[in-house]
Image (cartoon, grey):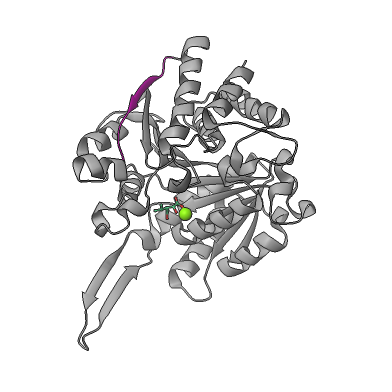
Amino acid sequence: MIKVKKRKILLLPGDGIGPEVINEVRKVITWLNSKKSLDFEIDEDLAGGASYDKHGTPITDEVFYKALESKIVMLGAVGGPKWDNLEFQKKPERALLKLRKELKLFANLRPAICFKQLVHASTLKPEIVSGLDIMIVRELTGGIYFGEPRGIKPIDNGERKGINTHTYTSSEIIRVAKVAFDLAKKRSNKVTSCEKSNVMEAGQLWKEEVQTLHDAEYKEVELNHMLADNCSMQLLRNPKQFDVIVTDNLFGDILSDQASMLTGSLGLLPSASLGEKNKDGEMRAMYEPIHGSAPDIAGKGLANPIATILSFAMALRYSLDLDKEADNLEKAVQDVLNDGLRTKDIVAKGNKEVSTAQMGDAIISKLK
Ligand code: IPM
Ligand code: MG
């Protein structure tokens, strides 16, 4: 087994605006190294379409092994129309899915926070979203994304059949539910578990296992079960009823996109994908902004680096136990927003529009 190097950070900028936003994180890391004597070792390599263009594969074995020995992987974004017609195994997204699966990053944390400075950027009424602070915990290595059998095969009548399989085992459900309960204990102590137990056996198992775990180990946390379609509706009707939502891979993909829009700013939302702790307490992890590669604005200095910088703040908190540095970085972001600086995606009347690099520099100038 490859051992994790405690100080190693692997930057995988990827495609589209990925390189621009990762560049700002690199500046933050360099600042921490020089001003706080944090001896992070930075490495950088290709993933996604950028890797396909150079090596004919979305991620090479060499890069994959670098990821395995890194304490943290910081990913920008992968994909773009240029690679849309590639065969399935060569698509840029396969790099992401391989990293998630092979690094066993089963718990995906996607906070949806409505920044007070941006309440009016949401498509929902201010009173519905102001003060919103939800954490979606998405199972990331199971379910229909990875289940077997899968594929497209010819069938008797000359048609073809597309097959994907939705499966969950008890242990897969329990380990991600534990993450959700543990997080809730540090927040508002409330978990909503979402599935489709009314139509899917895997959903029924999900509900039963979460309830059993709750009754055995987390009685002090409030637990509600909700059908995923209802959850999607409730997220728009009254999103502040939620604290932590735990759900499977596919529902989590959809519900987290929906929740992110409540905040009015895709460019501000970070994510963390966490693995299991080994017996030495070591955990692999990957951090990435939840926005995609946005090829339409790539290379123009328009991208918002805040989601990526806040993803690095999550890395400081969850992987490095540097809570003080994480607070400091998050505070710097708030300070810059209070000063009225905005990248183009969130600029409004009275703000000062800045480029990707100017935003990164402004945040660094607020670090203490
Ligand atoms: C996400 C993305 C990915 C997913 C894609 C890019 C494979 O939508 O991280 O939510 O479906 O998981
Ligand atoms: Mg998604």
Pick whichever, 208 or 27, lies toward us. 27
Residue span colored magenta: 39-48
Residue in the image at 28% along x and 28% along y: 3
Any magenta on residue 45? Answer: yes
Residue in the image at 77% along x and 51% along y: 126
Q: Position of residue 295 (x, y in %)?
A: 43, 47
* Image quarter in which the N terminus is found: top left
Any magenta on residue 206? Answer: no
User: As drawn, is 255 to the left or to the right of 76?
Assistant: right
Pick whichever, 21 or 182, lies toward us. 21
Residue in the image at 47% along x and 37% along y: 300
Q: Which residue lies furthest to the bottom in this view?
A: 157
Pick whichever, 230 or 168, lies toward us. 230
- Magenta span: predominant SS is loop
Asked if residue 326 is positioned above or below residue 191 in the image, the reply reads above
Q: Is residue 279 visible?
A: no
Q: Position of residue 25 (x, y in %)?
A: 48, 27
Q: Where is residue 91 in the image (x, y as percent from the top left)?
A: 29, 53
* Image quarter in which the C terminus is found: top right
Q: Residue furthest right?
A: 127
Q: Can residue 224 be seen in this view?
A: yes
